[in-house]
């Protein structure tokens, strides 16, 4: 398993160490923050929910300009500054005693996190060859899950003590983890700055790229699997089945360990647009099967059979998750112009806060309230989004090819060239789909 988690030496491994650092702190933060803000600070659950909804909504619209900043100023320096800003926002939680400061700190945290994700993707794109990016991202995802698991265990220690000092220690750990992350990122080489914008080219070109926007929207639908695992399935198990409540924790551990062990293997064959769209399409089929199996768990089976059905549903769900992740990573890079990777990754990453913001209400209404028909409808919706991804990607490729061809027609061949088309073929020619070096 360690060989599956650790990426190759060099820039990928440095990125993994940075990922491990802040995911460890985040794992402890995630399992303790709600209790800290309610029990110690005295905020109501409604206040916390409102602040986080506002914060992630703001974060979702700042990822693009911060990604564009990484393109213009360099992704390494931008990532370092945003890691420091994230650490500062977490450290500020140590001193918060009322709602308004909490709202402001939460907004800073969400903005910095969304920007950091975009800058890191741009940094990876500048340091890792295109063909190897999805494999490296799979390693980073495994590292992320390992850090979250260890961090959650540390957070469990704080929950056991249930004291103000224990909670504050967790926040200090999380803040320090982002400081260490910034120091680790400084070990990476600087990435050459992107080329200057062409004449008439918009500053935020991604906002005018309709095919990429459609791909991003479809990916946001598929990312509903995130609140499905963290919120909807636990509520379903407790409210709609006769399974023991401890199974909720067991299913979460199963998901974490599966991603740690098998994400790299799942991503091994994804190396271009065709293989990526196939992976996403397969994920939709598996997700439909998972939803049907979860729906079956409410059929009043014996407890042992219900547990087995829920475990089977969780196994199918994590297989779909790993396939969808690998495919979406590859697609997001393949469709992004080399000089706009930061802003394109910032835009593609908006699917995460959108799913976090809209998913809880949507899924609880669909599954916990509506029940079995809701599971079946969710499966059909996710399958539809996965099947639509292929045509959307091909549309984006055609649009990119047309843009490239238009740019070529503006370039006159050298007068001394014996062949009229010499000089036009190599510099801007679009490569055939498939493995890329």
Image (spheres, grey):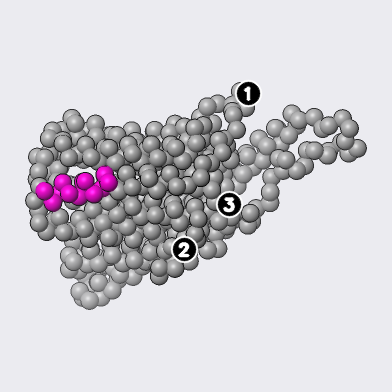
Q: Callout 2 environment at 10 Å: few (<14), some (14 to 19), or many (20+)?
A: many
Q: Which quadrant is the N terminus positioned in?
A: bottom left
Farthest residue toward the top?
A: 200
Whichever of labels 2 and 1 marks the residue nearer the N terminus, that label is 1
| Rendering coords of residue 381 (x, y %) | 41, 52
The answer to whether residue 23 shows anywhere in this view is: yes
Q: Are marks 2 and 3 in contact (CB under 8 Å)?
A: no
| Left or right of 250 on screen, residue 396 | right
Magenta includes 60? no
**Residue sitting at x 59%, y 28%:** 197
Residue pointed to by mark 2: 264
Residue pointed to by mark 1: 199
| Left or right of 71 on screen, residue 39 | left
Please state which of the two labelled residues, at mark 3 or mark 1, is closer to the viewer: 3
Q: CA distance from mark 3 to mark 1?
A: 29 Å
Q: Callout 3 environment at 10 Å: few (<14), some (14 to 19), or many (20+)?
A: few
Residue pointed to by mark 3: 129
């Amino acid at each position: 398993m360690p060989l599956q988690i650790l990426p190759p030496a060099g820039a990928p491994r440095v990125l993994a160490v940075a990922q491990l650092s802040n995911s460890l702190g985040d794992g402890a933060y995630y399992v303790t923050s709600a209790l800290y803000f309610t029990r110690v600070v005295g905020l109501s659950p409604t206040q916390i929910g409102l602040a986080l909804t506002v914060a992630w909504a703001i974060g979702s619209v700042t990822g693009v300009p911060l990604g564009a900043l990484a393109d213009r100023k360099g992704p390494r320096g931008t990532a370092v500054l945003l890691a420091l800003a994230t650490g500062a926002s977490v450290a500020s939680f140590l001193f918060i005693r009322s709602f308004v400061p909490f709202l402001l700190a939460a907004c800073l945290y969400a903005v910095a996190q969304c920007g950091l994700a975009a800058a890191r993707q741009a940094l990876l794109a500048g340091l890792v060859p295109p063909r190897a990016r999805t494999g490296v991202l799979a390693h980073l995802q495994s590292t992320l899950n390992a850090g979250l698991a260890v961090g959650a265990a540390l957070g469990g220690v704080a929950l056991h003590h249930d004291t103000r000092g224990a909670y504050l220690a967790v926040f200090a750990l999380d803040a320090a983890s982002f400081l260490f992350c910034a120091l680790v990122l400084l070990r990476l080489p600087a990435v050459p700055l992107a080329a200057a914008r062409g004449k008439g080219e918009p500053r935020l070109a991604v906002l005018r790229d309709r095919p990429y926007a459609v791909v991003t929207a479809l990916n946001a639908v598929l990312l509903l699997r995130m609140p499905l695992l963290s919120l909807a399935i636990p509520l379903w198990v407790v409210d709609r089945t006769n399974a023991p409540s401890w199974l909720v924790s067991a299913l979460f551990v199963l998901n974490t360990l599966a991603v740690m062990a098998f994400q790299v293997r799942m991503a091994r064959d994804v190396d271009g647009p065709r293989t990526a769209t196939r992976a996403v399409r397969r994920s939709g089929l598996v997700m439909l099967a998972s939803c049907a199996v979860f729906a079956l768990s409410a059929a009043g089976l014996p407890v042992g059979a219900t547990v087995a059905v829920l475990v089977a549903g969780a196994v199918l769900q994590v297989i779909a998750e790993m396939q969808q992740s690998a495919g979406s990573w590859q697609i997001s890079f393949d469709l992004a112009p080399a000089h706009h990777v930061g802003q394109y990754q910032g835009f593609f990453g908006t699917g995460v806060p959108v799913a976090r913001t809209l998913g809880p209400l949507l899924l609880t209404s669909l599954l916990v309230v509506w029940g079995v028909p809701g599971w079946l409808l969710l499966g059909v919706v996710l399958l539809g989004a996965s099947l639509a991804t292929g045509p959307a990607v091909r549309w984006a490729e055609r649009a990119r090819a047309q843009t490239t061809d238009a740019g070529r027609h503006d370039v006159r061949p050298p007068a001394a060239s014996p062949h009229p088309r010499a000089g036009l073929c190599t510099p801007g020619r679009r490569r055939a789909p498939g493995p890329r070096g």
